[in-house]
Image (spheres, rainbow, N blue to C red):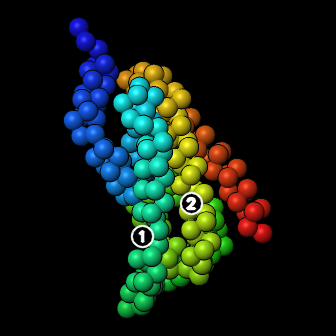
Amino acid sequence: MVRPEKRLMEQVQAFIRDYGIAVYAILFAYCALKSGSLPLFAGFAAHTGSLDLAAVSAATFMGGYLGDEARFWISQRLGSGIFERHPRINRLVETGKHLLERYGAAYIFLYRYPKGMRTIGALPLGLTNIRWRTFTFLNAASAAVWTILLVGAGYLFGSAIEHVVVSNWGLYSVLALALFIGMTLFAWRYAMRIQT
């Protein structure tokens, strides 16, 4: 009898063979919109030789970076004026702006990791006084760390990930989150030293 994880991998490899280069476009679009586990599995596919590691890394990084750049730009264009007619919401927005202006650099590094935050994470930053040059530098650094962690983990620990997904994904996802936070804090401190 064929093991379920083996059958899943055969289906994934067949999909990659059928759609070829479109797989990279799908990965780019996915990463532009959200930060789920697809880059991890794309790294694993690169480990098996089904995908090219450089192309997977480029699609993941560019999707993560450009998606957040677009949301930041849209938010800057809309501005916080859309909340002026709603005093309670406007007060919350102003409080959030003050917090982001103080802790914005850490926020830029961390918002792409919690589930659901990535899709809207850059929008509040566009309402602050954070300059685009600062945002784009920190966004690129954050996207690079995210790419290295996810694609690298998929590539380096490919066969182990296949087993983990089938058996104990919950425990390992907590460990992965701790690793993400540790690497992000290290990168954030490094970026702050460079910027000052």
**Which mark sits nearer the N-terminus, 2 or 1?**
1
What residue lies at 70% left-to-right and 60% top-to-bottom? 191
Q: Mark 1 points at which residue?
A: 70
Q: What residue type is labelled 1?
A: Ala
Label 1 SS: helix
- Pick the residue in front: 106 or 84: 106
- Pick the quarter of the image with the C terminus: bottom right
* In the rendered image, the vertical position of residue 7 relative to residue 44, given as above or below: above
Q: Where is residue 53 in the image (x, y as percent from the top left)?
A: 47, 37
What residue lies at 48% left-to-right and 52% top-to-bottom? 61
* In the rendered image, the vertical position of residue 71 relative to residue 150, given as above or below: below
- Pick the residue in front: 160 or 113: 160
- Pick the quarter of the image with the N terminus: top left
Judge left or right: residue 21 versus residue 122: left
Q: Give the crowd class for mark 2: few <14, some 14-19, many >=20 residues within 10 Å.
A: many
Instruction: Single out the residue that lies furthest toward the bottom.
Output: 85
Q: Mark 2 points at which residue?
A: 140
Q: Where is residue 178 in the image (x, y as percent from the top left)?
A: 60, 41
- Pick the residue in front: 132 or 175: 132
